[in-house]
Image: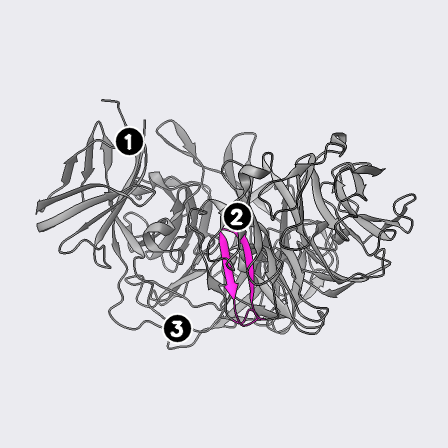
């Protein structure tokens, strides 16, 4: 027998709420019409169209793009393509998502395609109600496939064997028989709906991968390659080179309003446009605004009027046969919001990632968040910020080419260097000490984290020295978060908990305070509301995260795990529950009862809260687009409000009341970690199942197939199961009665390696 080891094993039970617990309403106070990274645009008519993008974003217009209304598919997917055969009936496809609508997108229905679980829809096109073609990409093997339907998408026939390799990039069908595709360095034509294809031997292979097709009729059209443009006038039998393109056009888009007039959008840095009015014999280059290098989709409902969408969520109108006029009709929120902080009840800042223009990575409000305006700042990103008093602001910008910490004493109108901190892991104000703050820096030279403190609102900073590292199993762990209750008393959160009572001059390890944290991938945040009571949060798993919440009531000497939400694949819990969890920040009120946790994973809960000190945690209802990625959570004690930032969507606000918050219980099958075990040499041991009575143990592989089932009697001690497991990831269920796993069942996961 081969020797196998298990990386992690956990036994779980579900979070069940026996009484209503409350949650206030989250309000989007800095809304943007479109989230970041739009990928596709489609117009059925000059007035009626749709755009789509990341996180299941779909927006609809009925007035040529002057106004847009958000539509919501039933689950998260990256929308890559639309096709409608009238204003009501159509498809939207994308990464892990296939949706249909019969009412113009007011409602979308999930239409999973059998056998396509690892595929993403790249392009879909219907020539009438019944006949359509679908380009799929295999996200594992990186191959392209072509499918055809003759019954409106009820069944799909695989035509990939007729297409051949390599990856299929674009397709155009003129009717139910005549179509064109570009695949790699080849262009092909079909005259029987895709059953057979004729490859054009004359398309110049040296122009690289062909990515964009446009046909005017069955004889004439253009195809854009990575390094040039080709043209056919004989139905694709031959393709002749029109022009070579310097650089890389593989990320560029084209449109011709006629056989002579057209343009190529060169999506390089800087972006520019190449226009021709004589079929490509000569070209005129013109510059474009910087942000247009991120255009990702193009559609022309009329030959001389088009729509372009951008990765920053902006929508552009393009007029003229050669793109003669381009202007922005919708400003997207490409702010990549990263962090938020307030200095008083009314004034606060939010930091962003890459934005347009590049010097506006900061948002400012002076009316309690009702309006936000951009502040110029000489760094392209702000990933951490700290408001110290009525004027002092500290910001940190982390980029591979530049790590800077800046300060402003006039609300962001002017900036100077705050100090030579290098990379910063954590910045926090110090409780109960006005004008005091602490910074945890990353000293790469000595491989340690150092503490800097200020007591004069950031005018001077004192280096308090290094916080001790921990070593476990030969690996060195450094603190990743800290919290000071006052200028003397603080805690640092790493592999262990370290404690100081002299402002960081000396530190003491609280031995074995968190022995179960050795399996955490990230020790994200720690907070205390008194010398005794505090919380710590983190998550395990670098790919599939499992969030954990811990509480101490003796100053950190002992900790109790209060809750955890685990990753399970969609075949087990359904797509709506199949999500990872990254608990990255916790904030709490001084009453010891109310606290909030930020779940920062894409598509996760967003915020969990408790009103009973952590005995029960429920997830807040945040009316956002599916797949939102929340980035920071801030408690403004001046105004008794919570602030939440989300990447590519905006800033959210919740006003707290004396009664607490109200809301919905956590969804079913949100499990809580309750113990750990191992799989070793053919023995699966689950040590914390102190249960008795008859039970059934079932084990499932990642395909959802049951690989083990056994009835046995619990003894009240560890559960020991001799069995042989091939390498892989497994989910187990322990229950009684019928064969269905239910809410109260105990669940466990294990990952077996050779």
Do the residues bearing badges 2 and 3 touch, measured as CB atoms within 8 Å?
Answer: no
Give the left or right position of residue 677, taking residue 597 as reference. left
List x then y, in percent, for residue 540.
38, 44
Tell me which numbered mark, 2 or 1, is placed earlier along the sequence: 2
- Residue 94 shown in magenta: yes
Q: CA distance from mark 2 to mark 3?
A: 40 Å
- Residue 416 shown in magenta: no
Name the mark nearer the viewer: 2 or 3: 2
* Magenta-colored span: 88-106
Q: Residue at x 37, y 66 (%)?
A: 594
Give the numbered dot on residue 204.
none
List x then y, in percent, for residue 473.
35, 28
Of 425 and 121, nearer the camera is 121
Q: CA distance from mark 2 to mark 1?
A: 29 Å
Residue 520 shows in this picture: yes
Give the numbered dot on residue 661.
3
Name the mark nearer the viewer: 1 or 3: 1
Do the residues bearing badges 2 and 1 touch, measured as CB atoms within 8 Å?
Answer: no
Of 61 and 17, nearer the camera is 61
Q: Residues within 10 Å of mark 1 (few under 14, many from 20)?
A: some
Give the numbered dot on residue 726.
1
Q: CA distance from mark 1 to mark 3?
A: 47 Å
Helix, strand or loop for disc 1:
loop
Helix, strand or loop for disc 3:
loop
């Amino acid at each position: 027998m081969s020797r196998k080891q298990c990386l992690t094993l956990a036994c779980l039970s579900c979070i069940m709420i026996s009484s209503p617990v409350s949650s206030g309403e989250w309000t989007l106070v800095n809304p943007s019409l479109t989230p970041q990274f739009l990928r596709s645009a489609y117009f059925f008519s000059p007035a009626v169209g749709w755009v789509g993008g990341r996180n299941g974003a779909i927006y609809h217009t009925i007035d040529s793009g002057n106004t847009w209304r958000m539509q919501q598919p039933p689950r998260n997917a990256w929308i890559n393509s639309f096709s409608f055969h009238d204003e009501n009936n159509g498809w939207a496809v994308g990464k892990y998502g296939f949706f249909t609508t019969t009412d113009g997108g007011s409602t979308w229905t999930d239409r999973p395609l059998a056998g396509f679980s690892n595929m993403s829809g790249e392009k879909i096109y219907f020539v009438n109600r019944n006949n359509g073609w679908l380009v799929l990409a295999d996200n594992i093997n990186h191959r392209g496939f072509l499918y055809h339907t003759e019954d409106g998408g009820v069944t799909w026939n695989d035509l990939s064997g007729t297409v051949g390799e390599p990856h299929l990039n674009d397709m155009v069908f003129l009717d139910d028989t005549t179509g064109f595709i570009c695949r790699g360095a080849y262009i092909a034509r079909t005259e029987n709906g895709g059953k057979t294809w004729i490859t054009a031997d004359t398309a110049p292979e040296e122009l690289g991968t062909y990515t964009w097709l446009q046909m005017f009729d069955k004889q004439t059209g253009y195809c854009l390659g990575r390094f040039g443009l080709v043209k056919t006038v004989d139905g694709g039998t031959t393709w002749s080179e029109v022009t070579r393109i310097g650089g890389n056009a593989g990320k560029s888009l084209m449109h011709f309003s006629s056989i002579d007039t057209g343009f190529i959008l060169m999506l390089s840095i800087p972006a520019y446009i190449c226009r021709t009015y004589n079929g490509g014999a000569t070209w005129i280059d013109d510059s474009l605004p910087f942000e247009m290098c991120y255009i990702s989709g193009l559609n022309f409902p009329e030959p001389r009027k088009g729509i372009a969408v951008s990765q920053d969520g902006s929508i552009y109108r393009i007029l003229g046969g050669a793109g003669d006029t381009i202007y922005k009709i919708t400003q997207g929120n490409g702010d990549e919001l990263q962090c938020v902080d307030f200095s008083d009840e009314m004034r606060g800042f939010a930091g962003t990632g890459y934005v347009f223009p590049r010097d506006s990575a900061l948002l400012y409000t002076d009316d309690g968040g009702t309006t936000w305006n951009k502040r110029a700042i000489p760094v392209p990103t702000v990933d951490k910020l700290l408001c110290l008093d009525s004027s002092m602001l500290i910001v940190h910008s982390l980029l591979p080419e530049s790590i800077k910490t800046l300060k402003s004493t006039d609300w962001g109108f002017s900036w100077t260097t705050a100090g030579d901190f290098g990379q910063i892991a954590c910045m926090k104000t110090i409780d109960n000490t006005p004008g005091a703050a602490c910074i945890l820096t990353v000293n790469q030279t000595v491989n340690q984290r150092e503490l800097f403190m200020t007591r004069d609102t950031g005018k001077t900073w004192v280096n308090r020295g290094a916080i001790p590292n921990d070593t476990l199993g030969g690996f060195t762990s450094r603190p990743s978060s800290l919290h000071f209750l006052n200028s003397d008393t603080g805690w640092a959160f790493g592999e262990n908990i370290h404690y100081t009572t002299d402002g960081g001059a000396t530190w003491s390890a609280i031995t074995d305070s968190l022995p179960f944290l050795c399996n955490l991938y990230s020790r994200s945040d720690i907070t205390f509301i008194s010398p005794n009571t505090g919380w710590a949060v983190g998550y395990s798993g670098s790919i599939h995260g499992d969030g954990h919440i811990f509480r101490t009531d003796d100053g950190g000497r002992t900790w109790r795990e209060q809750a955890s939400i685990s990753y399970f694949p969609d075949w087990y819990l359904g797509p709506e529950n199949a999500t990872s969890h990254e608990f990255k920040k916790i904030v709490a009120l001084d009453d010891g009862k109310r606290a909030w946790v930020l779940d920062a994973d894409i598509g996760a809960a967003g915020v969990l809260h408790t009103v009973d000190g952590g005995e029960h945690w429920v997830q807040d209802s945040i009316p956002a687009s599916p797949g939102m990625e929340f980035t920071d959570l801030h408690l403004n004690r001046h105004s008794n409000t919570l602030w939440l930032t989300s990447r590519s969507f905006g800033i959210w606000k919740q006003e707290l009341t004396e009664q607490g918050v109200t809301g919905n219980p956590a969804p079913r099958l949100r499990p809580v970690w309750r113990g750990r075990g191992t799989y070793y040499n053919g023995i699966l041991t689950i040590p914390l199942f102190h249960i008795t009575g008859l039970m059934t143990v079932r084990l499932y592989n990642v395909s959802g197939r049951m690989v083990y089932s056994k009835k046995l009697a619990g003894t009240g001690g560890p559960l020991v199961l001799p069995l042989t497991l091939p390498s892989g990831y497994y989910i187990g269920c322990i229950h009684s009665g019928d064969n269905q796993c239910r809410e109260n069942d105990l669940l466990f996961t294990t990952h077996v390696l050779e």
